[in-house]
Image: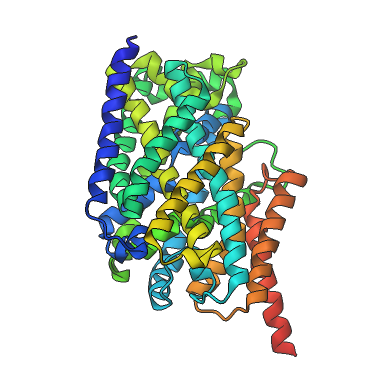
Amino acid sequence: MSTVSIAISFVAFLLLFTGVGLFAASRKQSTTADYLLASRNVNPWMTGLSAFATAHSGGMFISTLGWTYQVGISSVWLLLGWFLGDYLAWFLVHQPLRVVSEETNSETIGAFLAGGDRQNRSIAVVSALTTIAFLGAYAAAQLLAGSKALHAIFGWDYNIGIILGAVIVVSYCFSGGIRASIWTDVIQSVVMMLAMLAMVVVALVACGGFGGMWQQLTAIDPSLVDPVPQGLQFGFGLFLLSWLVAGIGVVGQPHIMVRAMAIDRPENMGLTRNIYAFAYVVFSTAAVIVGLSARVLLPELMQGGDPELALPTLAIELLPSLAVGAILAGIFAAVVSTADSQILSCSAALTQDLFPRLSHSYRLAKGGTIVVTVIILTIALASNKEVFALGVFAWSALASGLGPLLMVRAWRWPVSNGVAVAMMLAGIAAAAIWGLILQLSGSIYEVLPGMATGFAVYGAVRLVNRSS
C-alpha cells in the first residue's frame, strides 16, 4: 500500500478543514462575544451538525469502536442509554439555557453558572478550574485518539500526531474563535459520517454480510453476541440507567452546551435537536457494526494488540490507499472538531471566569487559547496512551461537577453561592470515589452517583431551609 497516496489524500482533507476555518475567521467581529459565542447568530443546521461533530469525537472512532471490538454487541446499551439521556437533555435544558444565558448576558458556561454575576467569584473559580482540569484532559484524549490513527497507518510516534493535531486546531481557533470551530465542524461532520458509512459497507462485505459476521462472532465467543453485559454487580437495570444519566451529563460539557448558547433563536432548538439526533443514531450504529466486523477480521488485536486501533487497521486491510487517507481524515475530523471546541471552552474559563480582568480584551482572549493549548498538549504528551479511560472519566467529572448546577440555573431555581460550590465539589468527589477508589464504574457509570450527589446536596439544603 502506498503511504504517499494515503498522505496525499489525508493532507488534502486537512487543508480543507483548515481552509474552511480560516475563511470563517474572515467573517469574525473583533469582540469577545463573537470569539466565544459567534454573536449568538448561528443557524440551527450548523448548530446541530456542529454539536454532533463536537459530541461524537475521536472517541467514537477509536475508543467506543475498540470497546465494541472487546465486548461485542452488549456495547450497544452504552450508546442507547447515552442517546436517550442526551436527547432528553435537549428537550429539558438546551432551550432554557439559551434564553437565560442571554438574559443574564453570560458569554461562558462559568458565567452562566455564576448567575451572570461576576461578583460570584467562588462559583466562577471552581467551575473554571473544573473545566480547565477535566475538559483539558478530555481534549488531550482527543489529540491522543488522532495520534493513534497516524501511528497505525504511518507508524509515526504518538507524540508527532499529538503535536500535529494541536497545531491544526490552534491555527484556526486562534484566528476565528467559535465561529471558525462551528463552520469547520459542519464540514468535518460530513467527512466523519461518510468515512464511517464507507467502512460499514466494506467491512460487512468482507465478513460475508451481517449473517456471516454474526455466525463468526458466535464461533469466536458466544458472549460477543449476548446482548446482556457480563459481570454486572448491580443488575442490568441500574447499568442502563447509569448510561442514560451519562447522556444527560451532556449538560455538564461546556464545549457542547456553549453551542446551545450560540444558536440564533431559542425557537430553533427543536430543529437543531432533531438534526443532532439523526446524525448520532446513524453514526453510532455504524460504529458498532464496524467494531463487530473488526473482531471477526482482525482477531490478532486481542493477542497483545491494541483494540483501539481497530478502525485504522481495518482500513489498511480493506481499502485502497486514497480511501485509507479519507478514513484517516474522518478520524482526524472527529478529533479536531471536539478538541477545538474543548480548547476554546478552556480558554474562555481561563480568561473570562478565572481572571475576569481579562474578560473584555479580545487580544487576551486569543492569548488564552495559546496558553490552554500548551497545557493540553503537555497532558497529552505525558498520558499513558489510553483514550477510553481518559475521556470517560473526564466526561463523568464534568457531568457530575457542572451538570446539576447548570440545570438548576437553566430552570431558574434559587441557589446560593455556598450551595452552588458544594454541589460542584460533592458531585466531583462522588464520581471520583465511585470510579477511581471503589472501581464500580463497570457496573454503574459514575455519572449516576455523581449527579445524584449534586442534586442531593441541593435538595437537602432546600428541605432544611423550608423547615427552619
Q: Quadrant of the N terminus?
A: top left
Report the side of 424 relative to 80 (left or right).
Answer: right
- In this view, the residue in front, 234 or 121, is 121
- Quarter of the rendering containing residue 122: bottom right
Residue plotted at (66% across, 36% down): 230
Residue 151 in the image, given as x and y percentages of width and height: 47, 21
Q: Quadrant of the C terminus?
A: bottom right
Residue 14 in the image, given as x and y percentages of width and height: 31, 32
- In this view, the residue in front, 224 or 58, is 58
- In this view, the residue in front, 429 or 241, is 429
Residue 91 in the image, given as x and y percentages of width and height: 41, 65
Query: Which residue is situated farthest in the top direction here?
Result: 1
Report the side of 89 relative to 24 (left or right).
Answer: right
Picture mark count: 0
- In this view, the residue in front, 144 or 388, is 144
> Is residue 241 visible to us here?
no
